[in-house]
Image (cartoon, rainbow, N blue to C red):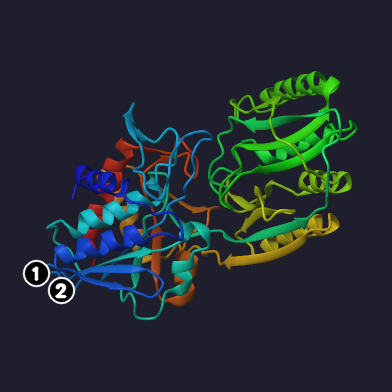
Amino acid sequence: MDSNSVLAFFKEITRIPRESGHEGPITAYLQQFAAERKLLCKTDPTGNVVIIKEASTGKENVPALVLQAHQDMVCEKNEGFEFDFRKDPIPYEIEDGWMVSKNTTLGADDGIGIAACLALLDSNLPMGRLECLFTISEETGMDGAFALESGFITGKTLINLDSEDEGQIFVGCAGGLDTTATYTFETEPLRMGYKALKVSVCGGLGGHSGDEINKGRANALQQLVRFLYTELQYDFQLLSIGGGNKPNAICREASAIIAVPSDETQDMIEDAEAFSKILEAEFAKGDPGIHIVCEPSDRRGPAIAEGDAANIISTLLAVPHGVVKMSPDIEGLVQTSTNLAAVKADGDNSIKVITSQRSSVVSELHAIAEKVEAAFYLGGFDVEHFGEYPGWKPNLDSHILKVSVESYRKLFNTDPLVLAIHAGLECGLFLEKFPDLDMISFGPTLRGVHAPGEKLELASLDKFVALLNDIVVNFK
């Protein structure tokens, strides 16, 4: 196996639809891959797939290795870019040493993990029994990992291929849950002499709500309601509000339709321009493209009733977002955070707000979820928590960790960083179901995951492949 074979499989994968919850095409591709090579393939009722390659001659006594990646991807695109994730191939370019999709997510999270597994299964490397596990719906609740049943995998050592920084080996991750809130509102007619304006916060980087929650990036939804709150003193009507998409992505675009008296439209536009300058100054380093635009809209009524509109705006402003606490034990590691992810229409007269919370400390996870819940309750929202998944406690005495560190040192004449990650990995669930598993996670360098512009560093792919090859061939 080399990086060219991995990249070739990944390019095939970019042509296969695999949105979370709709993994049928990629599942079928994996099954066909196994059938064509006469490899044992099992698919459980949930859609998880395991492909098994028996040990090479002379390697029959080597313990089995489980390599794991998830089938689905986060499907995000830039506003106005015509693209259908259910059928269109991902548009990518090779530029300055990176593979990048500029207007959509690339899906290297975790398509590159899938591709590495397939390239190994397709190779003639001398290795012990290999079990490649491909789970479903990792990005929307780890449904596949939750549904794994005893006996589906037999190996006692697992390498998760869902990390995003070459040179780092992960041995722990945060747990998390999602909190949604729903608000039902009354409506009122559009007032006589009022004209509609669309207020949009756009140009944000967005990104992964675990890995990049501490990078100083703007939350477009939070900044939109911040602006609208300052304008509540004026007599505008709120017709609609929305933004964001996935619970594990930082909101990078949000908009509202408001209506103001015709003779005040220019004042509102000027207020937005002034606020845009404030955003540009505040996020000059962390998110330099963030800005706000206010322009005429053809939208007509009805509007959200005045009291309900004020309540929605005030509540969304009060809901916390960002880092809550840094780890006192591991420098630079976020311990607890919360993400104000999205607001969506949830019917004719209601909206749904999507948030997610993460922490490596269970009590803190529940505490921040309760704080988010309390803010919504004060605003009269109905609140629901769901999808809680466990963290993964580090085991620094891990055998596979020692093997991997020694391999990295041998190949690159330096030690990798051994870290925990604030993002959620399926490893915590695997450990609950298979308590004897010895696990690590590593991968090539990815940037901008969960947002358009996601990219894969090709030089890091070479090192990732070399490390994986060496571990698999020499594991014992």
Outermost residue on the front side: it is 192
Image quadrant in which the C terminus is located:
bottom left
When asked about the image quadrant of residue 402, the answer is bottom left
Percent position (x, y) of residue 88?
36, 44
Left or right placement of residue 187 versus residue 114 in this view: right
At x 52% / y 33%, what residue is drawn?
A: 80
Using the numbered discs, state the Cα–Cα distance from disc 1 to disc 2 in whole angstroms. Answer: 7 Å
Q: Nearer the viewer, residue 2 or 343?
A: 343
Residue 294, relative to residue 429: is it above or below? above
Left or right placement of residue 90 versus residue 453 in this view: left
- The three-letter code of the residue at mark 2 reads Glu
Residue 456, relative to residue 116: is it above or below? above
Is residue 410 something one can see in this rendering?
A: no
Q: Report the disc number at residue 330.
A: none
Residue 33, relative to residue 90: is it above or below? below
Mark 1, secondary structure of its residue: loop
Q: Nearer the viewer, residue 317 or 232?
A: 232
- The three-letter code of the residue at mark 1 reads Thr
Percent position (x, y) of residue 464?
30, 46
Q: Nearer the viewer, residue 200 or 246?
A: 200
Instruction: Check contact, mark 1 vs mark 2: CB within 8 A.
Output: yes
Residue 474, relative to residue 102: is it above or below? below
When asked about the image quadrant of residue 347, the answer is bottom right
Mark 2, secondary structure of its residue: loop
In this figure, which residue is indicated by the disc labeled 2? 60
Percent position (x, y) of residue 82?
45, 36
Outermost residue on the bottom side: it is 150
In this figure, which residue is indicated by the disc labeled 1? 57
